Structure formats: C-alpha cells, structure tokens
C-alpha cells in the first residue's frame, strides 16, 4: 500500500481509517460475524438492524439473481441478546449500531439508542422505509444520545431536499442511502414457485444492478445536505467508490457485494483505491470529493466517436450494440459511418478496451 495516500475520513469526532463500511445485513448479525469482518480492510461496521424481539427468516431468504442479490432476511437476535453481543465485541474500527425503527415507535428507537451508546456503539443509526419515523426518532434521540446519529434513507424519495433539511434540523450527523430496491422476486421455472421462502416470495434487490440508481440518488442528496453522506447500494469495485465520492459522498457502504464476493472485497477495493489515487496524483479523498458536483456540463449534439485502430481488438461488441448499423469491421478493425451514427453513446460504454472515444 502507498503510504502517501490517506484514505481516512471523519464523521463528527470519529475517525475512520478508510471510507469502506460494512453495511447492516447478514454479515454483521452477531458479535462473531462483526469481529470476523473487522479483520478485513473495513473503515467501520454497521450492525444488522436490531429488533425488539428475536426473529427468524424462512428458507430460502437470500438468492443470487443475475449479478445481484434478492434479500428477504428479517432474522435478528433481539434487543436483549444484542446487548450481550455488543459487550463482547473487541474490534479496532468504529462500530455503528443500527436500530430498526420500522419495528418500534420513534420513542422506543430513541430509548434503545440511548442504551446502546453505553454498550460499545461509537455511532447509532436508524433505518426505516418511512422517513417521517426517522425524523422523529432523531429528534427525540438527540436529547438523549451523545454519540453521532446516522439514518439510512429508502430509495426514490422525490422530496429528498425537504426530507434532508428536516433530518438536519432534528440533529442528524450523517445520512446513508439507499436501502435495497423492491419488491423483487424470482421463480423456479420447473416448479413455478417463488425461490424465496416467505409467503409472497418477495424480497429486495441489491448489489451491482442498483448501483446507477444509488449514484444518482447520492448525487441529489449531496446537493441538499451539509452533513456527511454514506453511499450504499451496488458497490462492487474501487471504481464504484470513486464515483460515489466524486458525487459528494464521504464514505461508502457495502453488503450485497461482500455476500456475493466475500469479505476480501474490502481488501481488494482498499488496495485498488489507493493505487488509483496514487497513479492519478491524489493524496487524499478530499481532492476528488464532490468533483462531479463542481463541474458544469453542457448539452452537446451530433457527436461522432472515433476508433483507436491500435487498441481495437476486433471483438465486434460495438458492431452488435450499434442499433443503426453504423459500425462495421474492416480488416478486423471497427469503422464508424458518421452519416449513420445516432450519437447514442452505447458503443463508447460497450468497448472493453476503451478504443472508442470522442
């Protein structure tokens, strides 16, 4: 690792060694799992959402779907057992303890947070698909809780600016987004039955397929807040991390990618991120944070891409992707007919060698 690159971030008075958080989910559902995760290059760990009473999910409750994950895991140890688990945790990274406000009232959620801060929580966070509950929970908890408070927002809120303003007024220190997208399902074509074991067969989609949605949502949130933002949803590579930070995020949460690819994903992303920053002359994440927010863009029309004949490997992916038939192969090199080109952009983003450029 290049020691000249500083990956650390700050939220309130808490320092994190890098921007990579293990988000709440199956990989942080007990003390043992949390301590295992903390042996990898995580900046912080968020516990699984804590409910009042223990719960168990029917089999099956997590399934791979394409490059994504459909999750219907509502299992939990329950609040009393979690207190014992938290007291046994010994890790060298900050621990963020998550209260599932959708299963208790905002009053009770705030009460739980006040208790959890005395059981090893460096931060507390609330998650709910009803943001109004989050606002109220933060407002009440702010009077009782001394550690930083975070919330995790659901996707696709059109009133995101107003919502973020209310959360900041209530006293939130950090905002994470977004939760998994759904409902989603898959079906066994041999039996006709849903693959998930709950009654409806519904779960929520996460990992790579939802990343573009997350990126746009984080960009919008960062335009409307002054507190740090954690981008969660679909991150599987260092490039995803860079994009979220360029959109304005302070840190990045990963869970679906770690389930599908293993906890080593944190080690790889940390290494790759450091390498990329060093190669591009950056020494800290602050130098790229919000970069896309600061750039002015203009609408351009009728752009015709060019082909780098030296790097084109003749794979023909661009030919297949061109819906106007503007690209053909000549001597195993792609050639673009500018009169037929629709300037859509698919070929630029399809080429595996970035041999197509403007």
Image (cartoon, rainbow, N blue to C red):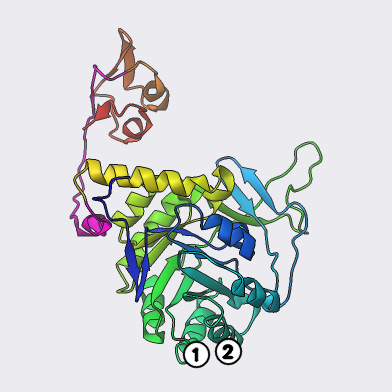
Q: Label 1, on which residue?
A: 140
Residue 283 seen in this snapshot: yes
Tell me which secondary structure the magenta stretch mostly adopts. loop
In x, y percent, where is residue 6? Answer: 28, 55
Task: Please state the extent of the stretch shown in magenta in the rendering.
Answer: 283-312
Q: Are marks 2 and 1 in contact (CB under 8 Å)?
A: yes
The number of numbered badges drawn on the structure is 2
At 39% across and 84% down in the image, what residue appears?
171
Vertical comparison of 114 with 74: above or below: below
Residue 306 left/right relative to 270: left
267 up-or-down from 138: above or below:
above
From the top left corner, tell me how far across and down residue 161 is, in percent: 36, 73
Question: Which quarter of the figure has residue 80?
Answer: bottom right
Nearest the viewer among 169 and 278 is: 278
Q: Give the structural element (helix, strand or loop) at label 1.
A: helix
In the rendered image, the quadrant that contains the C terminus is top left
Residue 294 on the magenta segment: yes
Depth check, front residue: 41 or 343:
41
Task: Name, please, the residue furthest toward the top.
Answer: 331
Q: Residue at x 37, y 24 (%)?
A: 318
Give the residue at mark 2: 107
Numbered tag placed on residue 229 in the rendering: none
């Amino acid at each position: 690792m290049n020691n000249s690159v500083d990956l650390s971030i700050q939220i309130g008075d808490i320092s994190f060694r890098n921007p990579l958080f293990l988000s709440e989910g199956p990989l942080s559902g007990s003390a043992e799992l949390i301590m295992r995760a903390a042996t990898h290059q995580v900046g912080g760990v968020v516990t699984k959402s804590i409910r009042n009473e223990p719960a168990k999910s029917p089999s099956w409750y997590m399934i791979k779907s394409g490059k994504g994950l459909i999750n219907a895991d509502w299992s939990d140890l329950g609040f009393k057992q979690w207190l014992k688990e938290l007291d046994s945790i010994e890790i060298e990274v900050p621990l963020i303890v998550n209260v599932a406000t959708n299963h208790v009232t905002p009053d009770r959620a705030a009460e739980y947070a006040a208790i959890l801060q005395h059981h090893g929580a460096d931060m507390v966070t609330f998650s709910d698909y009803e943001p109004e509950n989050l606002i109220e929970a933060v407002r009440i908890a702010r009077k009782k809780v001394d550690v930083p408070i975070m919330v995790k927002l659901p996707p696709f809120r059109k009133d995101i600016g107003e919502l973020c303003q209310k959360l900041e007024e209530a006293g939130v220190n950090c905002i994470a987004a977004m939760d998994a997208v759904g409902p989603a399902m898959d079906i066994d074509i041999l039996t006709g039955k849903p693959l998930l074991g709950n009654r409806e067969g519904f779960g929520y989609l996460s990992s790579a397929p939802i990343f573009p949605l997350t990126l746009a949502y984080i960009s919008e949130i960062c335009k409307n807040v002054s507190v740090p933002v954690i981008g969660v949803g679909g991150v599987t590579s260092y490039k995803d991390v860079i994009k979220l930070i360029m959109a304005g995020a302070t840190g990045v949460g990963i869970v679906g990618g770690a389930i599908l690819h293993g906890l080593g994903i944190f080690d790889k992303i940390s290494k790759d991120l450091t390498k990329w920053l060093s190669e591009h002359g950056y020494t800290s994440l602050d130098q790229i944070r919000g970069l896309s927010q600061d750039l002015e863009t203009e609408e351009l029309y009728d752009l015709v891409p060019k082909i780098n004949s030296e790097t084109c490997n003749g794979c023909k992916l661009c030919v297949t992707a061109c819906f106007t038939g503007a690209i053909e192969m000549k001597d195993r090199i792609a050639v673009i007919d500018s009169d037929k080109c629709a300037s859509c952009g698919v070929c630029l983003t399809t080429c595996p060698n970035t041999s197509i450029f403007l």
